[in-house]
Image: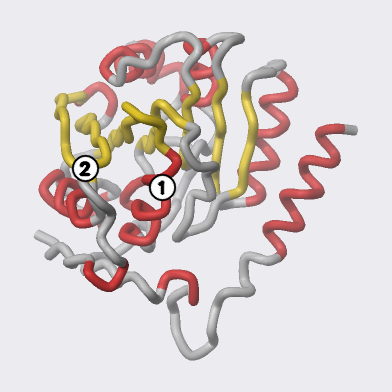
Amino acid sequence: MQRAALLAALLLLAGGCDAPWDSGSDRLETSREFPPADRPVAPTVSTKWSTEEARDRVNEAEDVMDSADVRPDMTVADIGAGDGYYTVRLAQRVGVGGRVLAQDIMPEVIERLADRVARERLDNVSIKLGAVDDPRLPAASFDRVFMVHMYHEIGEPYAFLWRLRPALRKGGQVIVVDGDRPIAQHGTPFRLLVCEFEAVGYKLVSYDDKQHAGGYLARFVPSGKRPAPDAITVCANP
């Protein structure tokens, strides 16, 4: 019954996803106070970057979680969770004293993930439907926010990152794993990634080469005040 209620609520949320659109524009009304990104957006072609077996053979998740310093009892968000590869492993890492919020913007993906969470009895995992311009995370709640192989699919990066920042706890970090290649090739050029984060009030604290995970791992923390949306400087796509 609890799962049925969860899915019903998610479908209600999904039903309202078209409401902010204005037929006279291809941008959400909720995004228009922010500048549009000067770059394309990679289409979502699959919820899987690779098979879970192949990723585990190279110890991808364990290495990435080690580099991100994920520890027991932390609260972590998995943005663009897809089929739950990181959700499951983050839940194991943070343990019964921690929490994982798995978020995605596609209702059908959320439904499949809810099935997996219930099937694997991941009692420390919650599921949330996000939006293209807003992760919809509760304020001051997360020690780490993961975005793995999905940043290049964010259509409104300035709005998204601006609204993400309040969700971090003191000492919280945003962890991005992506490929240093053009967005059309389903990656994010590293210089562009850093520029977009800095434009919204974050700073880079570390970079690690993670070729076995498909590219690089970058860690960001809030820095200074968030700029007003209309004061954000748009980054040029290299």
Q: Is 29 rendered above or below residue 157?
A: below
- Which tag is nearer the camera, tag 2 or tag 1? 2
Residue 153 visible from this viewpoint = no
Q: Amino acid at mark 1?
A: Leu
Q: Are marks 2 and 1 in contact (CB under 8 Å)?
A: no
Disc marking residue 238: none
**Residue at the right extreme of this rendering:** 1
- Residue with the mark numbered 1: 164
If the image is split into quadrants, where does the N terminus sit?
A: top right
Q: Is 226 rendered above or below residue 180?
A: below
Residue 36 appears at what percent x and percent y? 30, 71
Q: Is 35 rendered above or below residue 144?
A: below
Q: Residue at x 23, y 29 (%)?
A: 217
Neighbor class of circle 2 (other Cα within 10 Å; few <14, some 14-19, many 20+) is: few
SS assignment at label 2: loop
SS assignment at label 1: helix
- Residue with the mark numbered 2: 223
**Residue at the bottom extreme of this rendering:** 24
Give the CA separation, mark 2 to mark 1.
13 Å
Q: Amino acid at mark 2?
A: Ser
Q: Earlier in the sequence, mark 2 or mark 1?
A: 1
Asked if residue 133 lies left or right of residue 101, the reply is left
If the image is split into quadrants, where does the C terminus sit?
A: bottom left
| Front residue of this view, candidates 94 and 115 | 94
| Front residue of this view, candidates 183 and 206 | 206
Residue 32 appears at what percent x and percent y? 40, 76
Residue 138 appears at what percent x and percent y? 54, 42
